[in-house]
Amino acid sequence: MTEYVLGIDTSAYTTSIALVDAEEIKVVADLRKVLSVPPGQKGLRQQDAVFQHLKNFHELYGKIEADLKNITTVAVSSRPRNVDGSYMPVFTVGQNFGKIIAKTLSCSYIEYSHQENHIAASLINGYKNINDRILAVHMSGGTTEFLMVKKSPKGYSAEIVGGSKDITFGQLIDRIGTLMEFPFPCGLHMEKFIENKDVNKVKTPPIQKDAFINLSGMENFFANLYENKRCSKEDIIYSLFGYVADCMTIIIEELKQEHDFNTIIIAGGVASNSMIRTTLLSRLKENFEIILPSRENSSDNAVGTAFLPIIDRWYHEVKTD
């Protein structure tokens, strides 16, 4: 009998629904809609994001062509992180729709965190036997966290061991991008802008050698370069991406002195940047097993959420509350 897991993730900027065949480990449906951000704005208020999720969900759900009667589990991202008190209003949209669907189909319902979703989306292409010595890097518009990750009875537990003290990598990129009048979120548009162009790396201030770093000063640095026309737009973008990769390299080097890990998962929207991915892979692949999700699954998705109950089954652990 065919068994599907329906994954739902209603994050700060994307409505996502995915259907995964639990036996064949195959993505049957992967539907996403990025929330609309008005030109010039650097983000969305939670109530505006919730409203857009409510509009988007039925549209995406209606596009699933597979037989919904084969759904045996509904898995939902219900909170940002897998810790007590973690909460964002946007995730309640997915929770409510997920509970209604599970009740209607008389199937199991299970909740995970958005962060676990990103970790699992990195593993769907065959990393079945990874051990517990895992460093997961979650880089998105709202998060820059370096996590020591362990499998728990349901999903993953994670301890924050590094990251940013102020703004995130995603915020740094988006703030410089909106200053340059790129559409928000800006990373992909900035990346396309420098494709096939001659670029030079600008000398940047030294990066503090610490597991936790400050980034807000670099926002001022790159903004001044642009506003004072000291460098071309493409050189600033290229240098900004390079700076993010340099920061990540230093943090990982610092963490290796205190923690035992041999596998690094690099996930989140910022991890979809081809320059950052290529740089990190070339620097780290000799000393670590580097797990990068596909570029599509680096950004917000529901594929990881749908995959999590299957991973739990691999570990012969509970897959429902």
Image (cartoon, rainbow, N blue to C red):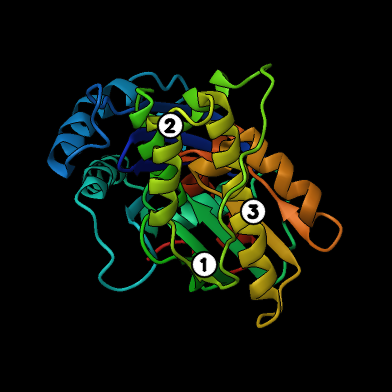
- For residue 185, which quarter of the picture? top left
Image position of 185 with respect to 268: above or below: above
Residue indicated by mark 3: 246
Which quadrant is the C terminus positioned in?
bottom left
Q: Secondary structure at mark 3?
A: helix
Which quadrant is the N terminus positioned in?
top right
In x, y percent, where is residue 60? 34, 24
At a point 35% along the width and 27% down the height, the residue shown is 34
In x, y percent, where is residue 163? 49, 65
Q: Residue furthest bottom?
A: 258
Cα separation between marks 1 and 2: 42 Å
Residue indicated by mark 1: 156
Q: Are marks 1 and 2 in contact (CB under 8 Å)?
A: no
Image position of 316 with respect to 170: above or below: below
Left or right position of 249 against 282: left
Image position of 275 with respect to 196: above or below: below
Residue indicated by mark 2: 226
Three-letter amino acid code of the residue under disc 1: Tyr
Q: Residue furthest right?
A: 286
Mark 1 or mark 3, whichever is nearer to me: 3
